[in-house]
Image (cartoon, rainbow, N blue to C red):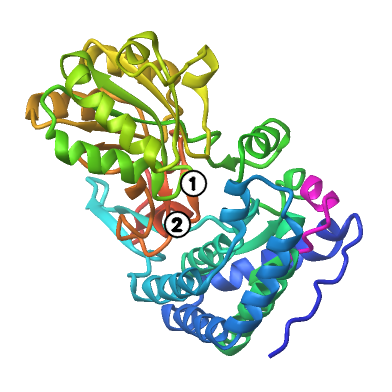
Amino acid sequence: MTAQPTPPMATGTLREHLGPAVRQAATALAQADSAAKNRFLQATAAALETQRALLLQANALDVAQASDQPAAFQERLTLNDSRITGMIKGLHDVAYLPDPVGRIRELTRQTSGITVGRMRVPLGVLAMVFESRPNVAIDAAALAVKAGNAIYLKAGTEALHTCRILDACLQEGLRQAGLPMEAVVMLPCDGRHLIQELIGSPQWIDLLIARGGHALFAALHQESRVPVMGHLSGNCHIYVDDRADLDQAMAIVCNAKLSRPGVCNAMETLLVAAPIAASWLPAMLDKLREAGCAMRGCPATRDLVPWVQPATEQDWHEEYLAPILAVRVVAGLDEAMAHIARYGTQHTEVILTQDLARAEQFLRGVDAASVMVNASSRFADGSEYGLGAEIGIATGKLHARGPIALEGLTCEKWIVLGQGQVRE
């Protein structure tokens, strides 16, 4: 198997050629058995292993050409042996998951004699537009196909060479599984006109998934005629309550901010209860500073730690995606929850406390896709939730929310089983 350059596609391609072919592939996938879909996953995993060296070379070229981009951008773009191994593991994990398609629940016999229930079915044709994280193409294709959907994948030009190799691996997986080759379509990275076709083709695409920065999601959400799933930004908070285990809190805060600052589930704002601020916050911020993190703080924070830079109003809204942290001292739980309600983006919010009643109040009262107690926000991830992988994080409230995996790429239809009944 060798990677071939993705051919250019002219304007109108989606409407005139790809649209019908991919829709037909989706129809076939909806009826495919689990064994065929799992063969695709396993064959794609084997192809990635075979092409590991070539994939690293291609990715190194992409990273070199992105040398003028911010460090967080380059970090998301970079593949290494560990991340490729993670992609391969994710494919096998999805293969082992139960197939949701065709699952029937709540069969209930009605007084008329009919039996009514609900069956889980694929959404149809998906499209994912993503920036600077080429590994998400594999997760997206794996979950889409296992859930019986066809999918378009549209990366930015920064991942051009990497995506050519990934495309070849996916096509090899489809070929070996005997599934339609149009089930996964990697659109040319430089075909920007194709984005306009994607967002303007509700007859050919059932759901658009945005994986990228604030500007990408905002533009797609505003302009698309196709329903869009994704999150606008990940301004995640950790509130350290005055009844927290403070040693535990220090470890969690460091992990949430520093393990991968450039991802959407990294903590961006630290809220600290006033009764513990003087005794705990200076040591916490010194530890973060020693690790290379910059701080922007409220007046109370700066009174305790004078070297912290003053926070502006914008800092409370900011998704830094960098080793920068906004810090605010709050009176207690109510003020922390009010701050999150005002500035949060409904992605992931965390409370650190040993008080069960306060933890329950936070869980019930905070509006976010993931709400956590005594754990790092970095756990907001499909693989960590036992979903095998994720196609993205949804912060909206329709259809699915949080890490989107197999079930989130399906819906339900009503089924009715009768024995000749007619309605009176």
- Could you say which is closer to the camera, residue 7 or residue 99? 7
Identified by mark 1, the residue type is Val
Compared to 67, does 30 lie above or below?
A: below
Quadrant containing the C terminus in the rendered view: top left
Of badges 1 and 2, the one in the foreground is 1
Residue at horizontal 63%, vertical 77%?
A: 55
The CA span between labels 1 and 2 is: 14 Å
In percent of width and height, residue 290 lies at 38, 40
Quadrant containing the N terminus in the rendered view: bottom right
Specify whether residue 210 is painted magenta.
Answer: no
Residue at horizontal 70%, vertical 34%?
A: 219
Residue at horizontal 15%, vertical 14%?
A: 275
Q: Bounds of the magenta span?
A: 187-197
The residue that mark 2 highlights is: 390
The residue that mark 1 highlights is: 263
Secondary structure at badge 2 equals loop
Residue at horizontal 70%, vertical 47%?
A: 69
In percent of width and height, residue 362 lies at 22, 25
| 4 left or right of 94 in image | right
Secondary structure at badge 1 equals loop
Compared to 329, does 88 lie above or below?
A: below
